[in-house]
Image: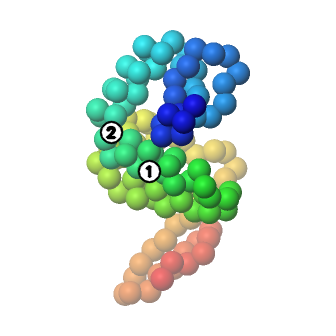
């Protein structure tokens, strides 16, 4: 059991498993192939996830949310995120929702539908 504490994820075929055990839908071989493919295409995100999982296991919920938010925010500026975002079509605005428009003129910012940005 001590070896499991050193793992970020442990694949299993057992039903009703709890973390760090994960039961891949297609079996262990399929799960390993999916993890390998994801890490090959997204090594930065994979590393960030491993570090987040390791660090957040000892954090309370508020601190864990801060760590997750910081990790996600850092990844949003990367090539991997831009590639992922470009592969998904933009969603149409939901009906009956307001949008924010920001206009800058002579160094002043004006906003409609939300808070002004400096």
Q: Can I make out residue 65 in this image?
A: no
User: In percent of the image, x 35 and y 57: which residue is there?
Assistant: 77
Question: Callout 2 environment at 10 Å: few (<14), some (14 to 19), or many (20+)?
Answer: some
User: In percent of the image, x 68 and y 57: which residue is there?
Assistant: 61
Quarter assignment of residue 94: top right
Quarter assignment of residue 34: top left
Q: Secondary structure at mark 1?
A: helix
Quadrant assignment for the N terminus: top right
Up-down relation of residue 50 to residue 113 (above or below) = above
Q: Which mark is residue 51?
A: 1
Q: Which mark is residue 5?
A: none
State the image coordinates of residue 48 (x, y, percent, origin top left).
41, 49
Closer to the camera in the image, 22 or 86 = 22
User: In percent of the image, x 53 and y 59: which residue is there?
Assistant: 67
Q: Which mark is residue 42?
A: 2
Residue 95 placement, left or right of 117? right
Residue 99 placement, left or right of 35? right
State the image coordinates of residue 41 (x, y, percent, origin top left).
30, 34
């Amino acid at each position: 059991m001590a070896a499991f504490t050193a793992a970020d994820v442990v694949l299993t075929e057992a039903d009703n498993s709890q973390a760090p055990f994960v039961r891949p839908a297609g079996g262990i071989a399929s799960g390993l192939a999916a993890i390998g493919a994801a890490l090959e295409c997204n090594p930065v995100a994979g590393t960030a996830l491993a570090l987040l999982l390791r660090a957040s296991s000892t954090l309370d919920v508020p601190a864990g949310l801060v760590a997750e938010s910081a990790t996600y925010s850092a990844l949003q500026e990367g090539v991997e995120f831009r590639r992922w975002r470009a592969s998904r079509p933009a969603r149409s605005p939901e009906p009956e929702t307001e949008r924010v428009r920001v206009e800058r003129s002579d160094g002043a910012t004006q906003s409609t539908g939300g808070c002004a940005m400096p």
